[in-house]
Amino acid sequence: MKIFILTALLLSIFAFESNAQVYEFQTVTVIESIIPNGLGRSRMITVNETRDYKEFTSTRSEEDNDRNKSKRGDIRVKGFDETKLLNFFNIGGIRFQNIAANDAIVTSKLNTMSEEGWELAFVTSGVESYGDETDENGIYVTRYIFKKAK
């Protein structure tokens, strides 16, 4: 009986490991301007091309200190969707209608991705400002990372 249980346990472990899911990922980046008077640019970006990071990566060591010599033009992606968004500020200050409009557009994109079988896996965000705490200039970046089973 112990051999049977041990065999069943081992078989279930191997079966579980062989069913490991492989995913493809898609990133949607939202950049919202935090620049007064509506002078900034706000966009949602989704890439339509692929790149193999290995082509642009070098492994450096004490013996081999050569860096990757890729050209910037080889890394750049020209095929992407750029969705216009509204800036957080206009001449009157914070424009809450603009924030609501951006939320509606981003939500539409998230819903479309979900309908296409993508699952939201991670969300990360950050703010970049150019000066001290009184400086209102900057950008707010949010990255939505989606995954889909291959």
Image (cartoon, rainbow, N blue to C red):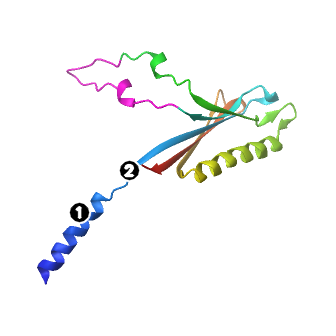
**Kind of residue indicated by mark 1:** Phe
Q: Quadrant of residue 30?
A: top right
Q: Position of residue 48 (x, y in %)?
A: 54, 33
Q: Is residue 7 magenta?
A: no
**Distance in Å between CA atoms under marks 1 and 2:** 17 Å
Q: Main secondary structure of the magenta part?
A: loop
What residue is pinned by disc 2?
A: 22
Q: Position of residue 61 (x, y in %)?
A: 24, 25
Residue at the image position 13 percent from the left and 84 percent from the top: 1
Please tell me the numbered disc located at residue 132: none
Q: Position of residue 70 (x, y in %)?
A: 39, 17
Number of labels in the image equals 2
Instruction: Give the residues in magenta.
Output: 49-68
Q: Given the current orientation, which residue lies at the most extreme bottom position?
A: 1
What residue is pinned by disc 1?
A: 14
**Kind of residue indicated by mark 2:** Val
Sequence order check: which comes first, mark 1 or mark 2? 1
